[in-house]
Amino acid sequence: ETGVTQTPRHLVMGMTNKKSLKCEQHLGHNAMYWYKQSAKKPLELMFVYNFKEQTENNSVPSRFSPECPNSSHLFLHLHTLQPEDSALYLCASSQWMTSGTYEQYFGPGTRLTVT
Amino acid sequence: DQQVKQNSPSLSVQEGRISILNCDYTNSMFDYFLWYKKYPAEGPTFLISISSIKDKNEDGRFTVFLNKSAKHLSLHIVPSQPGDSAVYFCAAIQYGNKLVFGAGTILRVKS
């Protein structure tokens, strides 16, 4: 595997279900991110992990719970979601820099539908 | 309030001609700008970037121009190819590695 991988690619879940999204990066990066892309909206940053520590929580509801066990893996645990949470969830990674380049590399995303 | 704006939702260009995608921003603290390209069912792919200390960066067919006084940047693709048809996102960053994205512009290159 190369780059950033995400599983599953598609997920349909009911509002009472609990599910998890998984992201893995094979780039040797030390920062990982979760983004949400809703229809016709810009990508919205949800969470940032820098060296496995959460450094940003962009006012995300508690029904979304991130987990970063190591610098290569990132999870997003989902529970009691709402239909408006249906969106494309994208994972990204980068090399955390205090200056210089900031390119983030994205996975293919998980298309989530909440019924 | 959107800090990064792409005011053209779509752009259609003939193959071989120049594509110009525009982006405006409001936050003068942004110090690094990036363009991403996205195909359907794929994640965004990094294309080209520019630091705020420069006004131009070129990589093959892609050139990004930055006008800090106008808070405006643009991506030029010359010559445009049908495979360039995708959604293009402008993004900006200030200290902290937090990317702020525009809403995207759909580019269609007609052959």
Image (cartoon, helix red, strand yellow):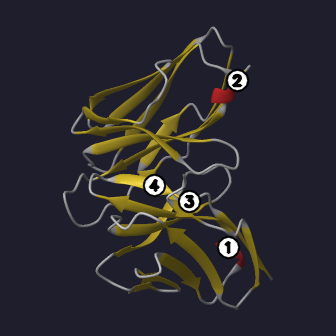
Chain letter of mark 3 equals B
- Camera-near label (2 vs 1) is 2
What's the distance in space between the residues labelled 2 and 1, CA to CA? 35 Å
Label 3 Cα crowd, 10 Å radius (few <14 / some 14-19 / many 20+): many
Q: Which residue is mark 1?
A: B83
Chain letter of mark 1 equals B
Tags 2 and 4 both on a single chain: no
Where does the N terminus of chain A fall, quadrant-wise? top left
| Picture residue at 63% right of the left edge, 90% below the top | B79
Query: Do the CB atoms of the residues marked 2 and 1 lie less than 8 Å apart?
Result: no
Q: Secondary structure at mark 2?
A: helix
| Image coords of residue A87 (percent x, y) | 64, 36
What's the distance in space between the residues labelled 3 and 4, CA to CA? 7 Å
Q: Which residue is mark 3?
A: B102
Give whichever of discs 3 and 1 has the lower sequence position: 1
Q: Which residue is mark 4?
A: B100
Q: Which mark is residue A83?
A: 2
